[in-house]
Image (cartoon, rainbow, N blue to C red):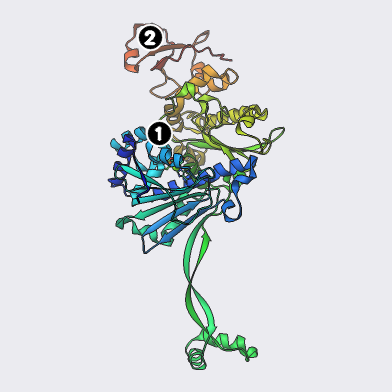
């Protein structure tokens, strides 16, 4: 197109696209989930704006907050459309190509060392997964503040943007058209798409429709001869005749096949956190976690806590301990207050970057909070100041620490000395080593919590684990240490160094172990001094 402006992809983005295009990764399905997740994000954004300004939604179909999927078998195009916030020309240029996010190079590195492409969404570059299945992609978008534009790229290092003067006006929102590669023709099958939406996008909070084509039976007037033939040959025809007996004056009809098309709803929009915990299965929690955290690895969350808080401040929450720490957990620890919780007010998504819903040291948790007490029609800034948030935060911390404590309590490596029935033992066998795993992934967060959260210091201290001269290669808690203390021993001894091997050779250690004192090993970087109240 002559009016198209050309842009080059930022270098890292270009590398990322090369990796995706040339990937032999067999699970190409993931692109659909990424596109639906983007559509859902865009719908959340416009719904949020509409809280303070109804006008933004527009009228008629434009106001419908939904996602539509359409297939064009002849042209081999799969398109996904939302009526979300849309993108201005500038948004298209920035978001889809010229500005690399911090996750871009992190993901490129991961992929070069054999990482799992499935985790692409966690790195904030999920959009580019479209090139797993398409060799040419068009993004048509209309934002309230701009005209309609088309972004297009064949992933050859460049993309083009043109003002859209030829497609149907979208009203508002975005349509992504994937021109599928030959090997990806399966994504033109309705059944395949239905399965995928079921599998990956079950927990999307907006209706997802697929344009489906069906063969249906229609009754049309028939001439005498044909209908009498039918009557004799098929039992159904006989039945028809019976029912029509007293309507003899009506003309005879026959059934023919006709194709009709309609929007078929693929998901039932249900918020897991609003259901009673008794009714939600472990598998559903697990799947919800995966879609919430964009963590589509094979592992289940380590634990979760689903509860309703009542009283002055009412809210429902569902918190998860992920199976693994995210790649950038401690990277920007001191200048990042954003929790990983999604905040909803009366079912409406407000933000997933709310400041200070949880203290920093608990930012490894994922989850959602839905409050009935917070006001809906105020700005994010006003909401951020709301007095209820303090109460919410306090309750969330309690519940989070309880949940973590339970991982330890249920872990047989931790409390192997407790009397258990056989049934309990087999149940516990599954949880073997869970807390050690937790400690390995998130132990640093607990230590940071001890420094930062004076109110909960004692609760956090119970979650600490150390290897020690008497822990026999396992992790010991301070309670265990105390139970092994010598009569009259007043202090807890610890020794700091870079490795256990090095510490075991220390002459200081020898002096204490000779006197049969237990000494904890503190490995790695020192976190400053910590004073613990041991009562
Ligand atoms: P992420 O969703 O994690 O931000 P993506 O690579 O999936 O990363 O998307 C990149 C960006 O492109 C999004 O942050 C958003 O700004 C924009 N975007 C993608 N799809 C849409 C859409 N359907 N509507 C509006 N904006 C979109
Ligand atoms: Mg995305």
Callout 1 secondary element? loop
Q: Which residue is at a point 42% across and 34% down the rendered structure image?
A: 324
Cβ of mark 1 under 8 A from ligand 1: yes
As displayed, is residue 327 above or below residue 239?
Answer: above
Asked whether 310 or 22 is in front, the reply is: 22
Question: Viewed as shown, does residue 100 lie left or right of 377?
Answer: left
Asked whether 97 or 447 is in front, the reply is: 97
Callout 2 secondary element? helix
Q: Position of residue 233 (x, y in %)?
A: 47, 89
Q: Position of residue 331 (x, y in %)?
A: 42, 25
Residue 72 in which image quadrant: bottom left
* Residue 297 appears in the figure: no
Residues at marks 2 and 1, CA–CA distance in whole angstroms: 48 Å
Q: Which residue is mark 1?
A: 101
Q: Where's ligand 1: which quadrant?
A: top left
Q: Nearer the viewer, mark 2 or mark 1?
A: 1
As displayed, is residue 444 above or below residue 188?
Answer: above
Label 2 close to label 1 by CB (< 8 Å): no
User: Total number of numbered labels?
Assistant: 2
* Residue 233 appears in the figure: yes
**Circle number at residue 509:** 2
Cβ of mark 2 under 8 A from ligand 1: no
State the quadrant of the C terminus: top right
**Circle number at residue 59:** none
Q: Position of residue 14 (x, y in %)?
A: 31, 39
Asked whether 515 or 40 is in front, the reply is: 40
Disc 2 crowd, CA 10 A, few/some/many (<14, 14-19, 20+)? many
As displayed, is residue 1 above or below residue 214?
Answer: above
Disc 1 crowd, CA 10 A, few/some/many (<14, 14-19, 20+)? some
As displayed, is residue 130 above or below residue 111?
Answer: below
Q: Position of residue 105 (x, y in %)?
A: 34, 33
């Amino acid at each position: 197109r002559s009016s198209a402006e050309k842009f080059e992809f930022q270098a890292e983005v270009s590398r990322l696209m090369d990796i995706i295009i040339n990937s032999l990764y067999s699970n190409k399905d993931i692109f659909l989930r990424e596109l639906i997740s983007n559509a859902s994000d865009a719908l959340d954004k416009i719904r949020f704006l509409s809280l303070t300004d109804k006008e933004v939604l527009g009228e008629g179909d434009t106001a419908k907050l939904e996602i539509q999927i359409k297939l064009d078998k002849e042209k081999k195009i799969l398109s996904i459309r939302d009526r979300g916030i849309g993108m201005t020309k500038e948004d298209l240029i920035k978001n889809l190509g010229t500005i690399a996010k911090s996750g871009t190079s992190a993901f490129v590195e991961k992929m070069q060392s054999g990482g799992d492409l499935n985790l692409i969404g966690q790195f904030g570059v999920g959009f580019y997964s479209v090139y797993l299945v398409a060799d040419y992609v068009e993004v048509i978008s209309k934002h309230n503040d701009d005209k309609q534009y088309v972004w297009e790229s064949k992933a050859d290092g460049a993309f083009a943007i043109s003002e859209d003067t030829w497609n149907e006006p979208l009203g508002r929102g975005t349509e992504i058209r994937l021109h599928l590669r030959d090997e990806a023709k399966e994504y033109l099958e309705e059944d395949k798409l239905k399965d995928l939406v079921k599998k990956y996008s079950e927990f999307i909070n907006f209706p997802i429709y697929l344009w489906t084509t069906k063969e249906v039976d229609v009754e049309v007037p028939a001439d005498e001869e044909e209908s009498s033939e039918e009557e004799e040959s098929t039992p159904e025809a006989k039945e028809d005749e019976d029912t029509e007996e007293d309507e003899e004056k009506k003309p005879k009809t026959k059934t023919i096949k006709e194709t009709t098309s309609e929007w078929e709803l693929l998901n039932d929009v249900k918020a897991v956190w609003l259901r009673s915990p008794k009714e939600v299965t472990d598998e559903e929690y697990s799947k919800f976690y995966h879609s919430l955290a964009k963590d589509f690895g094979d592992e289940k969350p380590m634990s979760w806590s689903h509860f309703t808080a009542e009283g002055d401040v009412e809210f429902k929450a569902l918190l998860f301990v992920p199976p693994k720490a995210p790649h950038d957990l401690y990277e920007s620890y001191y200048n990042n207050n954003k929790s990983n919780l999604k905040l909803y007010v009366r079912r409406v998504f407000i933000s997933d970057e709310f400041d200070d819903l949880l203290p920093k040291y608990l930012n490894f948790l994922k989850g959602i909070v839905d409050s009935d007490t917070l006001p809906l029609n105020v700005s994010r800034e006003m909401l951020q100041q709301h007095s209820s948030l303090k109460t919410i935060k306090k309750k969330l911390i309690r519940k989070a620490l309880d949940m973590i404590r339970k991982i330890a309590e249920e872990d047989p490596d931790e409390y192997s000395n407790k009397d258990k029935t056989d049934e309990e033992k087999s149940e516990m066998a599954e949880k073997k080593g869970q807390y050690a795993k937790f400690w390995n992934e998130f132990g640093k967060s607990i230590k940071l919590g001890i420094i930062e959260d004076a109110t909960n210091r004692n609760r956090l201290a119970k979650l600490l684990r150390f290897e020690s001269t008497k822990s026999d290669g396992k992790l010991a808690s301070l309670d265990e240490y105390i139970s092994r203390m010598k009569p009259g021993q007043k202090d807890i001894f610890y020794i700091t160094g870079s490795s256990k091997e090095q510490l075991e050779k220390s002459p200081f250690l020898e002096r204490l172990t000779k006197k049969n004192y237990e000494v904890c090993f503190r490995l790695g970087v020192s976190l400053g001094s910590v004073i613990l109240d041991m009562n």
